[in-house]
Amino acid sequence: MLTFYSADSRLRQARTELHDGTLVAPFECPERVDLVLKQLRLSGLGEIRAPSAYGLAPVLAVHDKDYVTFLANCWEAWLAAGHEGEAIPNIWPARRMRGDHIPHAISGQLGYYALAAETSISAGTFEAAMASKDVALGAVEYTLQTGEPSFGLCRPPGHHAAYDQFGGYCFFNNAAIAAQRALESGKRRVAILDVDFHHGNGTQQIFYRRDDVLFISLHGDPEVTFPYYLGYADEGGEGKGEGFNINYPLPHGTSVATWMATLEQALAKIQAAGCELLIVSLGVDIFENDPISAFTFTSEDFTNLGQRLAQAGLPSVFLMEGGYAVDEIGVNVSNVLHGFEQGV
Ligand code: OKS
Ligand code: ZN
């Protein structure tokens, strides 16, 4: 399988994450991609290719222009304001405040464009986010042209990024950008299957009123985990999007057997909807030893997941989302992709 990867993903070098009341070294660290790459090479998955630069047009097809400008300028504005440390939001347009007002000061803008406070912005964040969406676009272009599967080793991840909000380590919604590109190239309906431990609130939001992208997510129950305010089972889409958003919130500790049985339901929906391309938001934070998640996949279970996804018989693009057990992240990703190749 062909992998797309950009060395510019390393340009995101955030030092701080607000985690359980403490500023810690970010879980979403550059070593994650280094270790995945290493294992893909070791296991002989196939060629690793750098993507072209696709510019901002495909980003603006799913994100707000002012949001993109904010991201591009945030770090410089933070420095210009004389702040120390990294750009972290700490005030929001909360209920009963002016929800539609964008203040002049960068500290106010941060809250307007953020959906959470764990994700800091610093030098290179925007450049890495650009590289990450190029990786996704390179992968989807390749699969559109050849019908062959591909893996986009995106970093930073994307599925929490909404139309005009960053958070949960995400800035541009790589899967949404890739899906939109596939539609523009002529696919009539695309499935995004999000297997990351966390609900893909951004992807859901972007396509919530549309029937050309079927979004299906299996994830930890938002009653008890991030992102808390979206990802419930009763969120089924709106308007012509009704029926094209499907959430499977699952309890902490859910067995792999239950998870895989739920995947069967998801795949049946994808078949029934006549989707012409499958984009997998591949978070391997469903791993039993993930430090911030609570599902129970073993490394071997990831092989079975890949095999089962291959049986869907669709042109498939895998895009990296979460996964923070760095010692095992390479094997877990590699197992999904090799499993897919075995399962075809
Ligand atoms: C902060 C918890 C933040 C969780 C962010 C989720 C990142 C992720 N202590 N999304 O898929 O993996
Ligand atoms: Zn996750």
Image: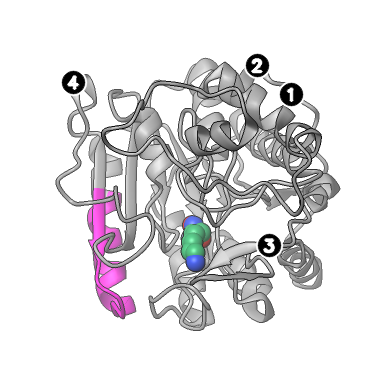
Q: Does the segment drawn in magenta span residue 251?
A: yes
Q: Is residue 198 above or below residue 240?
A: below
Disc sitting over residue 239 in the figure: 4
Q: Is mark 3 within 8 Å of ligand 1?
A: no
Where residue 236 appears, x then y in whole percent? 19, 38
Mark toward the start of the polypeptide (2 vs 3): 3
- Alpha carbon separation for disc pair 4 and 1: 32 Å
Disc 1: which residue = 54
Toward the viewer: 170 or 94? Answer: 94
Disc sitting over residue 57 in the figure: 2
Q: Amino acid at mark 4?
A: Gly
Q: Amino acid at mark 3?
A: Thr
Farthest-out residue, front: 82
Disc sitting over residue 332 in the figure: none
Residues at marks 4 and 1 touching, judged by CB atoms closer than 8 Å: no
Where residue 153 appears, x then y in whole percent? 68, 52
